[in-house]
Image (tube, grey):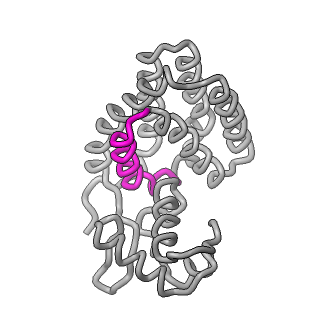
Amino acid sequence: MTKIEREPLSDRAYGEILKGMSDGTFAPMQPMVIRNLADSFGISATPIREALQRLVAERLLVQLPNRQIVVPQMTVERFNHLLPMRVALEGMAAELATPLFTDEDFVRMEALIGRIAETTLTFDARAYLKLNREFHFSIYEKSGNPELLLVIQGLWLKVGPVFNGLFDADHYREHANDEHRNILAAMKRRDAVAAREAMADDLKLAAKALLPRLLRTPAD
């Protein structure tokens, strides 16, 4: 995790924890241990504690009866409520971004796909999750719609913690980058509708890998 060096430290700790939730660094029900986070970020415990309390207040983290703060659990029902929202909104972002991509953007995305391919060969799940997020948000940020981007970021905060289970599925690991290539190929053709459909296929492939690993009933 990135070392935090500048003020305000609590805001920076907040941002780093959000990033970790979004890219799958933190798993569902993982305890957020203040001392461990402080050591990782290179700061004292106080700004970490403040950031965690802020995230609890925003219902992005959960405080258990024993006072332990954890990442929320994900159930099949909740995941299935979020998936069609993601398909619609992230597909829309891909469609909007297609005519706005430049040749330089495509070169950068091709290089990113190459780096993702390396992680699937080395079984480097942590690197894959970070690069996968970079791939998706490189598209979403290019959509030209900051309000849409904010909603997508919020959805990824909810589902991101379950992404660390993706590499447990051999089929997903072997084929995830195929969908990335399909998205980029459609965008290169300037086929915005096809880009939207390819993005939907990518999200559904991940969902198929993740659903068997989720709780069937709400957590107690």
Figure quadrant of residue 91: top left
**Quick check: 83 left or right of 45?**
left
User: Along the line of sight, which residue is nearer the eye, 128 or 38?
Assistant: 38
| In the displayed structure image, the side of residue 173 where residue 160 appears, left or right | left
Q: Residue at x 74, y 40 (%)?
A: 118
In this rendering, is residue 64 above or below 98? below
Q: Which residues are magenta?
A: 144-164
Residue 135 % position (x, y)? 57, 39
Q: Residue furthest front?
A: 7
Q: How many marks?
A: 0
- Residue 33's spot in the image, x, y percent? 49, 80
Q: Nearer the viewer, residue 44 or 145?
A: 145
Query: Where residue 20 appears, x then y in whole percent?
Result: 52, 61
**Residue 219 position (above or below residue 101):** below
**Location of the C terminus (image quadrant):** bottom left
Q: In percent of the image, x 42 and y 75: which residue is there?
A: 51
The answer to which quarter of the image holds residue 199 is: top left
Name the residue: 63% across, 30% down.
Answer: 105
- Residue at the location (64% across, 71% down)? 3
